[in-house]
Image (cartoon, rainbow, N blue to C red):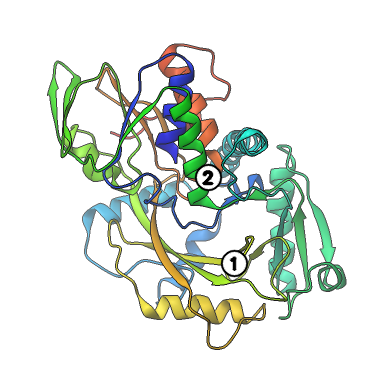
Amino acid sequence: MVGIACALELARRGAAVTVLERDRLGHGCSYGNAGWLTPSLAVPLPAPGLLWQAAKWLLDAESPFYIQPRLDFGLAIWLLRFLAATGRRRFERGTAALVALCRWSVDAWAELAARSSEPFGFQRTGLLAVYEHERAFAAGRANAELVARHGVPFEVWSAADVAAREASIVGRQVGAYYFPRDAHCEPYLAVRALAGEAARAGARFVESAEVYDVELAGGRARRLLTTAGDFVGEQVVVATGAWSKRFGARLGLRLPVLGAKGYSLVVPRSAGYPTRSLMLAERKLALNPHADSLRISGTLELVDEDLSITRRRVEAIVRAARGMIRLPDPLPPHELWRGLRPCTPDGMPMIGRARGLANVWLATGHQMTGLKTAPGTGRLLAELMTGEAPTFDSAPFRADRYG
């Protein structure tokens, strides 16, 4: 998604753009994610206090946030950097930057939905974050007020409000925060719609073109060797998501991007399902209603590039969802998907010129904000590459902040 957004904005500025896709467009992390376009949740992953909560979760293989215990020096360094980024001031600065990028992007998605001939299920029906305990509900107020300071309005719903206005919630709850400007979409269809827009702007797409080596000379990337032939370009944009660490090594870059595995299940829609996007806040689950299905997404497991499926974690997601909404038992035939979110230690994307390489640019590390900030990322990167005045403050996203 991020790479296509960059291609679109560069093509709009008259650049001749070729996108090299190792598989098929949209079949990476953008295929089956939650589909949320939510400025209310545009925050860095290393939040204040998360480390201590995560320490408890690490002992539970079914928890929402899990790291399989292993001896890995690189992981240890990543976690130390993560710890250093959990300070309140740093978190709030990162939130301000991400919310600005996300708000612009969601408006761009709305504009695309209005003019595109390829519908992608865009709906601006808001997000309802539901809480089960008073203490968590009170803590959630602080985050709601934080994003409100950056232009994201919210409403406080009592338990009675939730029961009256969102009948799909049947489990215990004490109230919710409703963010009316949030939206959602079908992620894969959104990829296709954005790719169509980029193609009409002049971008060229080459699928099944895996870059297996890069020729470097004079501090520049000179040639890309791919399974579909060799490519030479004046500038190279690296938008490789969870594979950025491995691909960056080919460029002599140390990019601390780890893949964080998440799962989603798409089940046929039936009576009693949600009418809007739901976040089961304490269970860390995302529920998204689509035209003919319900998407249930959850878990974050730092695994690097491991795409194996852990049955126990999938079953934990289903149990957690059943605790709050009605689901058929057993579930009817459904789609199970897993993908890797590209996470930097500070939870901020890397957008801009790579350190030490004159013609290499990065657009990666978007953790769980890739879909919701892709249009803004493309805009910012294109502005930096062409010398335009940036629409957003680029400093929090500096691509050269890591060696």
Q: CA distance from mark 2 to mark 1?
A: 16 Å
Q: Residues within 10 Å of mark 1 (few under 14, many from 20)?
A: some
- Quadrant location of the C terminus? top left
Q: What residue appears at the point 35 percent right and 18 percent down from the top-left corner?
A: 16
Image position of 215 (left or right of 309): left
**Which residue occupies the extreme bottom position in the image?**
329
Q: Residues within 10 Å of mark 2 (few under 14, many from 20)?
A: many
Residue to which mark 1 is pinned: 293
Percent position of residue 333, x then y: 48, 78
**Quadrant assignment, res 173:** bottom right
Percent position of residue 353, x then y: 35, 23
Percent position of residue 157, x then y: 83, 63
Q: Nearer the viewer, residue 65 or 285?
A: 285
The residue type indicated by label 2 comes to Ala
**SS state under label 2:** helix
Q: What residue appears at the point 60 percent right and 51 percent down from the top-left corner?
A: 185
Q: What residue appears at the point 50 percent right and 31 percent down from the top-left corner?
A: 197
**SS state under label 1:** strand
- Quadrant location of the N terminus? top left
Percent position of residue 383, x then y: 48, 18
The residue type indicated by label 1 comes to Ser
Q: Is residue 86 visible?
A: no
Residue to which mark 2 is pinned: 190
Q: What residue appears at the point 45 percent right and 70 percent down from the top-left corner?
A: 335
Q: Nearer the viewer, residue 44 or 119?
A: 119
Question: Do labels 2 and 1 touch, CB within 8 Å?
Answer: no
Relative vertical location of residue 229 with respect to residue 292 in this rendering, above or below: above
